[in-house]
Image (cartoon, rainbow, N blue to C red):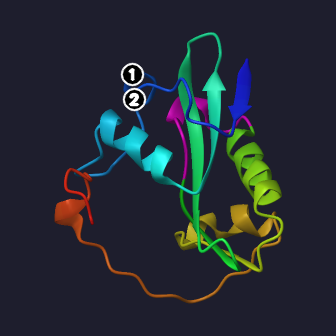
Amino acid sequence: MIKYNHSTDNITPAMLHGFFVDWPNPPAPETHLKLLKNSDAVVLAIDTKKRIVVGFITAISDKILSCYIPFLEVLPEYQGKGIGQALVRKMFQKLKKSYMIDLLCDADLQGFYKRFGMQSSTGMFFRNYKNQSGKKSIF
């Protein structure tokens, strides 16, 4: 059974394995937990039988007008079961008073986000891949 939670309470690094697939320098589970705890909003999908996190979405915000969703991930073996859609719906519900909710995604994922009323746009980004693991604090 999948349970959705808006809190990182009782989440441990041992519950956070298998994410960041195909990243050359993925964050360790301990760093992943810090990422979740430091986000302004989080929704977790938890397999209650296995006691593991199987999906998550995070948001950061100025708490006035804007929110940015940096991460939406579902473990590969749990994909195609509606978990990603549920995570987005629950996050959008949490952010419903925001003026803008932005995210970056690859072109092949835009159709997924259009289902939630999002529009495609152009944007810019910079990635410092040597810091991808999150081992160093940015502040």
Residue drawn where x is 83% and y is 71% of the image = 117
Q: Which residues are magenta?
A: 72-81
Relative height, residue 47 to residue 72 (above, below): above
Is residue 1 visible in the rendered structure shown here?
A: yes
Q: Secondary structure at mark 1?
A: helix
Along the line of sight, the residue nearer the viewer: 10 or 132: 10
Q: Amino acid at mark 1?
A: Ala
Q: State the mark number for residue 110.
A: none
Are discs 1 and 2 less than 8 Å apart at CB? yes
96 with respect to 35 (left or right): right
Is residue 20 visible in the rendered structure shown here?
A: no
Residue drawn where x is 70% and y is 39% of the image = 83
Percent position of residue 42, x then y:
61, 48
Q: Amino acid at mark 2?
A: His
Along the line of sight, the residue nearer the viewer: 67 or 117: 67
Residue drawn where x is 52% and y is 70% of the image = 106
Crowd around label 2: few <14 · some 14–19 · many ≥20 (10 Å): some
Percent position of residue 136, x then y:
19, 56
Percent position of residue 27, x then y:
30, 45
Relative height, residue 23 to residue 97 (above, below): above
The count of marks equals 2
65 with respect to 106 (left or right): right
Q: Quadrant of residue 97?
A: bottom right
Q: Which residue position holds label 1?
A: 14
